[in-house]
Amino acid sequence: MSFKSNNKVVQWVEDRLPIISVMHHSIYEYPMPKNLNYLWNFGSLAGFALVTMIVTGIILAMQYTAHVDLAFNSVERIMRDVNNGWLIRYIHMNMASFFFIAVYIHMFRGLYYGSYKAPRELLWQLGVVIFLLMMATAFMGYVLPWGQMSFWGATVITNLFSAIPIVGENIVTWLWGGFSVDNPTLNRFFALHYLLPFIIVAVVMLHLIALHTVSSNNPLGIDMKGPQDSLPMQPYYTIKDLLGVGVFLIAFSVFLFWAPNYMGHPDNYIPANPLSTPAHIVPEWYFLPFYAILRAIPDKLGGVLAMFGAIAVLFILPWLDRSPIRSCKFRPMARIFFWIFLINGLALGYLGGQPAEGVFVIASRIATAYYFFHFLVLMPFILPMIERPRELPSSIHEAVMKS
Amino acid sequence: MADGATPANSAQGSGETRREFLYLTAGAMTVVGAAGALWPMIDSMNPSADVLALSSTEVDLSPIEEGQSVTITWRGKPVFIRRRTGAEINTAEETPLADLPDPQPDADRVEKPEWLILVGVCTHLGCVPLGQKTGESRGEFGGWFCPCHGSHYDTSGRIRKGPAPKNLEVPPYVFLTDSSIKIG
């Protein structure tokens, strides 16, 4: 941080608050591995999505009314009467999905290249915390328009807590502020939906501090050993990240302008009716794998535990995977099982959207069992016995020069 | 730094124990105080007085014919009222308790066998089961069927099949006259 400026004002600030040198170090000269592929764009894309969500969300909050009698119509007013309200709401709706797309790819990239392994365990765990906060925020945001899916989604998800022995019912009443999902519930969900994104920003800061302490992983999964292995952030990766944002926005625009409701559910354009449950309740697509796990277990408490366990297992992943090799490039067996796991995850997503009957239930059970088998049996016990990793290159520079 | 921690005192041990005791009691009081300050805020999220005030409803049963069902609202939830037929009462009463996941005789679930009164909320995850309207699926046991995750209830509102752990709840109610009740 040998930052010196000729500008007297900048130097005056710098001498009192080292904000400029910190920024200079972390987004200008910060050394990145020089072999990163395009999968490393999705962290910055998730950050871009977060900022977009906060900006559009604050604007929407200026027009939205959090009351059971007014909420649905206030959203329709945003769509019809507020200048550009349709655009801002559709950005907010679709960017929520694209935020999850970016984060899921970011997570699978971490799984493939072993980005959760030492010394990046806390970095990974902070990411899982962000993922949990995102899910809570997205769920509460989906309740706000107060349509049929909002109401019944809120009812089903808050009822998950009634599975807790003894105090479950009291906790659910406390969450609701009444004896059913009603106005107090809507009010507090709005308050929390506004709060949580800023908590996410705070955890993202911790995620970045941890990242800059241990530095980025890379497709080879070996450490940078010197300047020949790295490139500075600016201009190499700032430009690459910006290109990624451009491509991301093109894909986003296709949905935003041609199919803004494709990832939503038509029932949510029916005002909430506490006396009539829609025939087929499905959560938003990004919850479907976990919803499938919930429904696969034929026991209420067991289903809830399995669903939360599916995320909890990610917290201990750095200690479940015992191979010292990070990247699946050099792990012939782990690579195969990564793809099986990915397909299994997609299958869970598909099954979560199907009715809970017949062959779908059986398939959900098999896929749920495989999900836990992968983390709890395959990774810690079977892979170390059957896998012989390939030889690692001696440095990033050497590998890059060879190819 | 403080006077009590002079070498002479700590050698005797008395200074350290006095200090530890003060730390411990001060710490304990802080926890109690913090919990006391936190509780009103947590409790403010529990049902408020105006929500609690809406907690009873009177219903006139006279227009309901035998075999008919009506749904009313109590505490923001649907309440099912079914005037059961003789056949429905018989099946409910004759079901062996061993067949029930949540065993309860029909007699414990009704004041008068003719009138079955239930909170119309599935005990699994809170959906409203089908079976109130004509033409809706009543499930395999002639009572109610929850479409969300496939729970079947019988003519006494008891869970028979599916993921729900408990029978449909019977709300507290009293007969004010022969043909009217007060729920709550």
Image: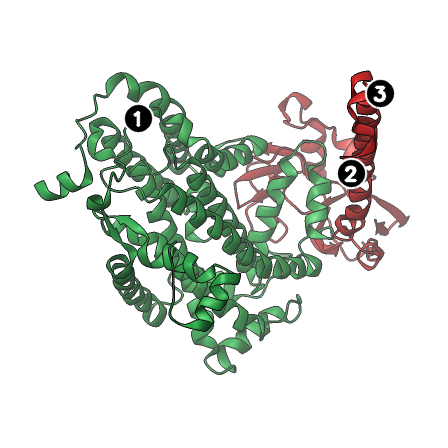
> Looking at numbered disc 3 in the image, what kind of residue is underneath it?
Ser
In what quadrant of the picture does the C terminus of chain A appear? top left
Are the numbered discs 2 and 1 placed on the same chain, yes or no? no
Mark 1, residue position: A324
Q: Which chain is red?
A: B
Residue density around tag 2, few if under 14, some if 14–19, many if 20 or more, within 10 Å:
few
Mark 3, residue position: B14
> Looking at numbered disc 1 in the image, what kind of residue is underneath it?
Pro
Asked whether A21 or A166 is in front, the reply is A21
Left or right side of A358 for A62: right
Asked if marks 2 and 1 touch (Cβ < 8 Å), the reply is no
Nearer mark to the viewer, of 1 and 3: 3
Colour applied to chain A: green
Asked whether A336 or A258 is in front, the reply is A336
Give x and y (percent) for residue B147. Answer: 53, 46
Question: Can you see residue A236?
Answer: yes
Task: Identify the chain of the residue marked 3, using the numbered disc in the image.
Answer: B
Task: Identify the chain of the residue marked 1, using the numbered disc in the image.
Answer: A
> Looking at numbered disc 2 in the image, what kind of residue is underneath it?
Val
Give x and y (percent) for residue B46. Answer: 76, 50
Left or right side of A393 for A190: right
Mark 2, residue position: B31
Residue at screen point 32% across, 70% down:
A258
